[in-house]
Amino acid sequence: MKREAILGISAFYHDSAAALLVDGEIVAAAHEERFTRKKHDYSFPAHAVAYCLSEYGLKPSELSVVAFYDKPLLKFERLLETYHLWAPRGVRSFVTAMPIWVKEKLFMRRTIREELKKIESALVAVPLVFPAHHLSHAASAFYPSPFVEAAILTVDGVGEWATTTIGKGSGKQIEMCAEMHFPHSLGLLYSAFTYYCGFRINSGEYKLMGLAPYGRAGSREVEAYKRVILERLISLKEDGSLMLAMEYFTFATTLRTVDDAKWTALFGVPPRTPEAPLTQAYMDLALAIQEVTEEAMVRLAHTARKMTGMRNLVMAGGVALNCVANERLLAAGIFEHVWVQPAAGDAGGALGAALAARHIWLGRDRAPNPDDGMSGSYLGPAYSELDTKRMARCFQAPYREYERFDDVCSDMAQLLAEGNIIGWMQGRMEWGPRALGNRSVLADARNPKMQKKLNVSIKYRESFRPFAPAVLEEDAKLYFELREKSSPYMLFTAPIVKRRRARTEQNSDAPLLEQINAARSDIPAVTHLDYSARVQTVSRRTNERFWQLINAFKSLTGYALLVNTSFNVRGEPIVMTPEDAYRCFMNTEMDHLVIGNIVFDKRAQPAWEKRSLLEQYELD
């Protein structure tokens, strides 16, 4: 009997991706950037599509449906109406955008069929469906969630017209209840401050979130900035909806985001130049917009509860990756449980489009998984022992091969406890922006120097950026005040339990680097300035090997957690292949590389001419 196979695609804006469902199971999903090594690659995800099909041995002609994650014609309508409304101010942006639309985006049916033809060398007559952008987000959040029914909140920059939606999921049905329209957008507001604080839009928002705790909470400066935002830049309503004061924003008419001169007059500081030193003013600005964003999200959640009557909430859209806001929403107690799609941004739209096609277009029933339907988000390519040995021969790289994985874990636990940094590559690559233990760089969370060392010598990035702990699920509450029983996808922060915190009071007037280097708990490498951490709970059910390593570290040290950061350097996509892993290992100060049961010791490797990775990749 023929199996039902549905391919989902997102492309041409940022973070292109593909995902494959077979009889309702998510069998493969991958970001195009991992194959092309181009961060946030927005081109058609030809490599990701080919991988998804090959993972299940399918040809394009064997697909039941192909689903694209938004409606290009409706998005084009919004573009034309916006340019018409603001004419002639948007002429430069219009002239820049039109050739790309005519060549790639407008005739999406033709583009998809041509790309599938390249794989099979024949025209593929598979049905194509185009769920709306925010319906794709909503589907990606609701259908894989563990809930039979839930409120759905999607918040991002903009889809076609919608920037925020509230929906209700029940069984196989999704009902969209309310939406907010462009140009009024919480996501675009947050991105505007990302730019103003000197970071790149669509990739630096998490930096802004990480910078916020260095702001002076409750200070006159932060409160003044918040008043300016709420009184001059936006009108935030009780229901969480907002309107932007468009005289201060230029994204509707130019290739820029804000009116620099007007913002400088409002805030008293000019836009920060990328890579310039971070002064207290930008830290205070980051905290101000973070607190405004959290308040807006809480108000939206209250509205979603009132509007739907649901006890549980699911979320997607780029703003749902703001794990600090997610924790604030949990703490508000509006919903009993909250679940967030691990690939909440545009890449996740590929999965949502496929799920919407299955449950809405084809009308298939749904049976929620009590955990969730994401298989731990380990949905990308895996590599064999033979692949690793071929790579080693190519680089003439000596290695040690272990017969027993238990021995790998015990030896690596010892090395980690001694202060070594380990590149860790196992099994299938993660889906979403977080490394969850299969493409990770690992270190000892007890080491007070490890945050600085990882940022400077491994990631080559700003020193203020925090790191996440990966903790055994069953031991998590010994370290963190979790509001949910688990946090498998690093999508919520949690306070460090009080008994682990350092007794010395943090001096917020100290220089930034002194604040970073101060040990605030007995796990200082993962304790942020506000005594929180972005937690990943590791389950033996979903990642046996990562669980075994952390458990071996626990047996040796008594601590059931490690620093877990993505296996890449700043500006580089997370590594995918053994070749990617080895190059990153040799170009950084990692001490050991573990791929499966094979271990590479940096001291034993042949001479390697390091190339500046910051020159190879654009800064994020």
Image (cartoon, rainbow, N blue to C red):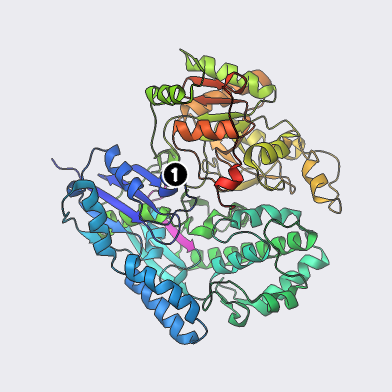
* Closer-to-camera residue (406/255): 255
* Closer-to-camera residue (504/458): 458
Can you see residue 241? Answer: yes
Where residue 270 appears, x then y in whole percent? 73, 70
Magenta residue span: 144-155
The quadrant the N terminus occupies is top left
Query: Toward which corner of the image does residue 480 lie, by quadrant?
Result: top right
- At x 26%, y 38%, the residue is 56
Looking at the image, residue 91 sits to the left or right of residue 516; the answer is left
Residue 179 on the magenta segment:
no
Can you see residue 25? Answer: no
- At x 42%, y 57%, the residue is 42
Q: Secondary structure at mark 1?
A: helix
* Closer-to-camera residue (331/41): 41
- Image height check: is 138 above or below 97? above
Query: Toward which corner of the image does residue 111 lie, by quadrant?
Result: bottom left
Q: How many marks?
A: 1
Residue type beneath disc 1: Arg
* Closer-to-camera residue (482/41): 41
Looking at the image, residue 563 sits to the left or right of residue 152; the answer is right
- Image height check: is 373 above or below 277? above
Identify the residue at the far top of this view: 403
Where residue 470 appears, x then y in whole percent? 59, 35
Where residue 293 appears, x then y in whole percent? 62, 64
Where residue 206 appears, x then y in whole percent? 60, 54
* Label 1 sits on residue: 34
Looking at the image, residue 586 sits to the left or right of residue 168; the answer is right
Q: Residues within 10 Å of mark 1 (few under 14, many from 20)?
A: many
- Image height check: is 558 above or below 11? above
Identify the residue at the far left of this view: 1
